Amino acid sequence: MIEVYINGEKERVREGSTISEVLTQKKVKPEMVAVEINGKLIDREDYAGLNLKEGDKIEYLFYMAGGSQ
Amino acid sequence: MDLTEEQIERYSRNIILTEVGGKGQKKLAEAKVFLIGAGGLGSPIGYYLAAAGVGKLGLIDSDHVELNNLQRQIAHKSEDVGRPKVESAKDTFEALNPEVEIVAYNERLSSENMMDLIKDYDMVVDGSDNFPTRYLANDASVLSNKPLFTGAVLRFDGQAMTVIPRKTPCYRCLFEQPPPPGFVPSCEQAGIMGVLPGLIGLVQATEVIKYILGVGTLLTGSLLVVNALDMSFRKVKVPRNEKCPVCGENPTVTELIDYEEFCGVRRPNERRSASSGS
């Protein structure tokens, strides 16, 4: 297990976890968010390929429009 | 032009602040702000900008006041149900401060009218309630080099960011691709705690005022993320995206596009409807 920060909170995740796995665990669909790791924007196509490392700071930011669609 | 005695009295609490003074109050009086939306976000934004003494406030919204708006859209009253929102909001803001020139545009914002509408204004505030308008507001701001103050809310969450075109990240630097239709619920579907647009709208209005006065640190390159349930306010650093289609190194968006098509709200080749509601 490794220690990472997800949306500012310290969490332990399986070593080698990917963004996709973290999002699935949080019940968040990739299309609902923009993701940054350590202040860098991650392309959605890389969510399944990038492995998280100890100390990584992950932010997943929800798309929000409001109102009515 | 000097402030009148009445203005000095009205704005005394502003003027006393060293960051404002008479000079700052005059800057506010010269500012021309274009506000998209006279609803949840637009209500507190317009209200407080009018209170602050902004010179000119353009308000655009094609909706009419509905009963379910009144849980949060404080620019309107019960007796306004059925009225165009921009007219109701204009009355409310004018009653608070008759000095502000308020121009109400009872029409739907689109690529066709956007650039023409904002040419008389210095900055754009996004209080809209749908993705096509958000991308439209962003692109128009960047293309016309006018600062954008964006904010959004859902359930108990809110976000806000300030964009200085080509200097700081724009909305698309972070939210490059709109979500496919149906992936992100609207407030109508998921609900919105009434105070949230108040919280976030005030953040946006504060940013506008700070920008006009030239004081403080703006939410540029920084997305404010708010959760009202745990009352957390976090600033998430947002980098400029060199691949941004609007403000990146090789921009592909050099003029306004069809945003409804871009957001998948309407399929290509489908006839554009003349609907005024959102």
Image (cartoon, coloured by chain):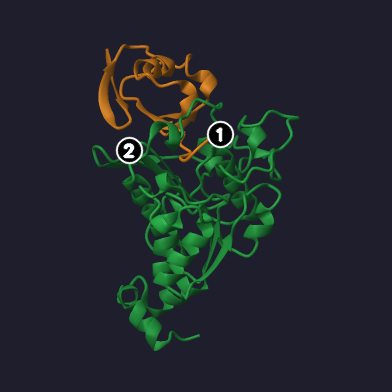
Q: In 3D space, how far apart are the residues under numbered discs 1 and 2 (Cα atoms)?
A: 24 Å
The image quarter containing residue B157 is top left
The answer to whether tags 1 and 2 share a subunit is yes
Q: Closest to the observer: B77 or B182?
A: B77
Mark 2 lies on residue: B156
Image depth: mark 1 or mark 2 in front = 2
Mark 1 lies on residue: B176
* Subunit under mark 1: B
**Looking at the picture, does residue B130 appear above or below residue A48?**
below
- Residue at point 35% right, 20% down? A26
Disc 2 packing (10 Å; few <14; some 14–19; many ≥20): some
Q: Position of residue B275 (x, y in %)?
A: 64, 42
Element at badge 2? loop
Q: Position of residue B277 (x, y in %)?
A: 58, 44
Residue B202 shown left or right of residue B167 in the figure = left
- Residue at point 41% right, 62% down? B47
* Subunit under mark 2: B
Q: Tell me what hue chain B is rendered in.
A: green
Q: Closest to the observer: B182 or B177?
A: B182
Q: Which of pointers 1 and 2 lies earlier in the amino acid sequence?
A: 2
- Residue at point 50% right, 43% down? B129
**Identity of the amino acid at label 1?**
Glu
Indicate the chain coloured orange by its letter: A
Residue B210 in sight: no
Q: Which mark is residue B93?
A: none
Instruction: Name the quadrant of the C terminus of chain B.
Output: top right
